Amino acid sequence: MGRILTGAAMALALVGALSGAALAQQPTEVRIGVALEPPILDPTAGAAEAIDIVVYQNIFEGLTAIDENGAVQPGLASSWTISDDSLTYTFKLHEGVTFHDGTSFDADDVKFTFDRILAADSVNAHKELYTDIAEAKVVDPFTISFTLSKPVGLFLFNLGRGDAVIVAPESADNNATTPIGTGPFAFVQWDKGNRVLLERYEPYWGTLPALSKATYLFIGDTAAMTSALLAGDIDGTNNFAPDSLAVFEGNPQFKVLVGTTEGETILGTNNRKPPFDNLKVRQAMAHALDRQAIIDGATFGYGTPIGAPFAPHNAYYVDLTGTYPYDPAAAKALLAEAGYPDGFSATLKLPPLGYARLSGQIIASQFAAVGIKLELINVEFAQWLQDVYTNHDFDLTIISHVEPFDIGNYANPDYYFGYDNPDFQALIKTLNETVDDAKRKELAIEAQTILAKDAVNGYLFELAQTGVWNAKLAGMWQNSPIEGLVLRGIHWVE
């Protein structure tokens, strides 16, 4: 009887076979269009966001990992302990991990990675984030400790950035063109000017991703990206031009994911230069800004209003947009109190970014209504870096600050907008050295509130992440709290 199938059993077997066939036909590959091609593929040797878009948490991994909400999660470290004085972090590492060339991962690789970051000839773009590491010590093959010269509140977060992914001494020198990491996807090939191909790494130590292959296609032109999406030549893109999203909204073949990024867009103000060194003038400008009109005109409605330099998806964010609400009458009164009853003239230097130049035109109109006459000066990015960022030769500018948790820039009086507040500097020092999360949140909110009240810059909006994807794809990050396009959760659904 064991060799004979009944009619019902045969039917069930046939159904199972057909279901298996259907599952076998389910796509397991994805083709993603991205606007910029990375200059190299080693995130520890370059600052370009385009590098992390391809490799972060895909090819390379860190001791910790940053999730979609910006929270720190375990990575290659399964757990850690922190000493009572917050100066020693001890990490237990996952065992059985291999790099994509088959070499084993252990604590020696971690020590090598950080010795390399801190070396005198290091080319790491954010070496400064790790200079408080006094010693990285191998305790045993799967335990490593870090001793810090002072407490660093963001230490675990910084370990999860692309700048701190773990590399092996056997392959590190070639990672720029042939990256070898421990992640769920292995590098296959880079056709420069066209694409990068990744394949699932079957011996991966963690949960295998659903995708078996991912291809990044470099498409810098919006019209070409639109055509590729509509033709099905690519399955999605993580950040599409907002002015062209209408093509896909309401189309059942696509899903549009709108989230936030780390890009705080500001009306950068030269606080060291009259009349902007006058608080009442800065307050007047803040009251003259109609954020929603700027968002509607410059981002086609996809930005999120901000009242301080902090991303709305961050757990420490506080909504301060009401500190100086749009009120032209209040703006005029403050200008008169500051000694400018008839307003004043100023220049607004604009880099070659669509959101900046569109925002500039709108702000010029809003400021004109309260008596501030702006001359718009369009500059190329190299000139903007020279004039504004380096030489501080500007009145006003518009730019997005995209680094995570960069509120500390305001504690540097030599930074380009020249804000010099000793009390704020002391607060940031305390924040940087605080490890307790609840206390860190209190301090971060206090810092945001000071900057909002001082109207250090005109806080406009958070740049949106506007992804366009095949409607049958799921698992993409809606928000972008850190540079990257993480593949591990992406999968096809019926």
Image: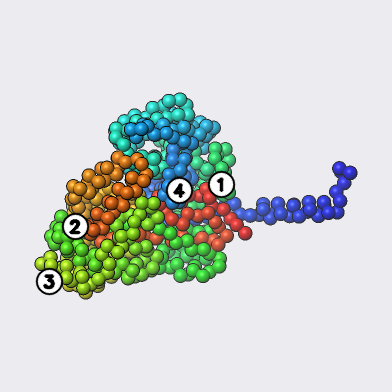
Residue drawn at 45 percent across, 29 percent down: 143
Side (left or right) of 345 relative to 313: left
> What residue did someone put label 3 on?
341
Q: Quadrant of residue 312?
A: bottom left
Q: What x and y, as percent, mark residue 80?
A: 44, 35
Are dots 4 and 1 in contact, CB under 8 Å? no
How packed mark 3 is, by other alpha carbons closer than 10 Å (few <14, some 14-19, many 20 or more), is: some
Q: How is the image coloured?
A: rainbow
Side (left or right) of 69 relative to 97: left
Residue drawn at 25 percent across, 64 percent down: 324
> What residue did someone put label 2 on?
270
| Image quadrant where one finds the N terminus | top right
The amino acid sitting under disc 1 is Pro
Q: CA distance from mark 3 to mark 4?
A: 50 Å
| Image quadrant where one finds the C terminus | bottom right
Q: Is residue 77 above or below residue 15?
A: above
